[in-house]
């Protein structure tokens, strides 16, 4: 559900896939509901990936109906909204760090571990990264928040995505003999209704001069899921308009 989940679902449906969309809020997501009305190849399963009990995934396995998974997108993640952060790295309490890692790392790994026995050979797994798992957030991008005092991007977010990249590399290499590929799709700044000051400053840092529209992302995901990328595993494919190349 959320900002990008329905986009990944739509991209897979367009390629003729049968899709199981699982996560929190999938039953009430308007975009997923619209997709559900137009296809019989979509199943929504409410699931909390941070629930470590085996029973939490029974409904996902049931939805498979004995079929093997050919492609899986691990898109779950939480982030802080720009401008709502603190002014010092030391102000973020341990419980906030714990919550971010509980979802972005432990929850993703928990779900992946549960689904590995149901992955086909060959199959492709795609994790979702962030440019802040590669580079540090630029303070200037957030300097106009809090009345011009500026705010600091939550450091747990980038740290969690860096951890997920390390996991992607290890799972990709260790699962390769079983015919399972694991790659990361790292996104740059995706347009999602940010305030005009942030957009203007961010786009000045992008060599291509614009934030990425959601519609520009589908092809990258389809490529990683498809046999066109059959020789790629443990790879981080960065789609950021050149932001991290300065």
Image: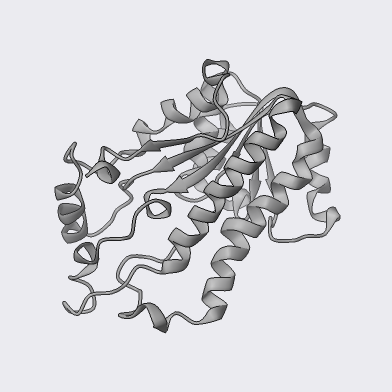
Q: Please tell me whether residue 9 is drawn above or below residue 243 in the rendered image.
A: above
Q: Is residue 234 left or right of residue 150?
A: right
Residue at the image point whose x is 19% and y is 80% from the top? 149
Location of residue 96 in the rendering, given as x and y in whole percent from the top left corner? 52, 75
Location of residue 213 in the rendering, given as x and y in whole percent from the top left corner? 31, 38
Is any part of residue 151 visible from this angle?
yes
Q: How many marks?
A: 0
Residue at the image point whose x is 38% and y is 55% from the top? 132
Q: Please tell me whether residue 87 is drawn above or below residue 27 in the rendered image.
A: below
Q: Nearer the viewer, residue 232 or 113?
A: 232
Residue at the image point whose x is 43% and y is 42% from the top? 186
Location of residue 143 in the rendering, given as x and y in whole percent from the top left corner? 19, 70
Q: In this view, does 112 lie to the left or right of 80?
A: right
Q: Please tell me whether residue 191 is drawn above or below residue 242 in the rendered image.
A: below
Q: Please tell me whether residue 111 is drawn above or below residue 73 in the rendered image.
A: below
Q: In which quarter of the image is residue 145?
A: bottom left
Q: Nearer the viewer, residue 198 or 21?
A: 198
Q: Is residue 10 left or right of residue 212?
A: right
Q: Nearer the viewer, residue 170 or 75?
A: 170
Location of residue 58 in the rendering, given as x and y in whole percent from the top left corner? 83, 47
Q: In which quarter of the image is residue 152?
A: bottom left
Is any part of residue 69 visible from this angle?
no
Residue at the image point whose x is 16% and y is 77% from the top? 148
Quarter of the image that includes the C terminus: top left
Color scheme of the displayed model: one colour
């Amino acid at each position: 559900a959320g900002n990008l989940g329905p986009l990944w679902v739509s991209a897979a449906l367009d390629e003729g896939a049968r899709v199981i969309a699982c996560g929190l809020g999938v039953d009430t997501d308007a975009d997923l509901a619209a997709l559900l009305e137009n296809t019989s190849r979509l199943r929504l399963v409410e699931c909390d990936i941070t629930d470590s009990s085996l029973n939490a995934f029974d409904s996902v396995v049931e939805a498979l109906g004995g079929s093997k998974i050919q492609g899986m997108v691990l898109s779950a993640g939480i982030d802080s909204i720009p401008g709502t952060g603190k002014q010092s790295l030391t102000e973020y309490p341990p419980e906030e760090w714990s919550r971010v890692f509980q979802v972005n790392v432990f929850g993703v790994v928990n779900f992946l571990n549960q689904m590995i026995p149901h992955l086909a050979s060959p199959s492709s797994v795609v994790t979702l990264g962030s440019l802040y798992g590669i580079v540090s957030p630029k303070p200037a991008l957030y300097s106009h928040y809090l009345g011009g005092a500026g705010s600091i991007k939550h450091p747990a977010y980038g740290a969690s995505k860096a951890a997920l990249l390390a996991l992607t590399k290890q799972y990709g290499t260790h699962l390769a003999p079983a015919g399972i590929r694991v790659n990361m799709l790292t996104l740059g700044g995706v347009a999602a209704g940010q305030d005009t000051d942030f957009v203007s400053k961010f786009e000045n840092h992008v060599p291509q001069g614009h934030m990425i529209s959601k519609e520009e992302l589908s092809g990258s995901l389809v490529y990683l899921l498809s046999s066109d990328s059959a020789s790629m595993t443990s790879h981080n494919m960065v789609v950021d308009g050149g932001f991290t190349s300065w």
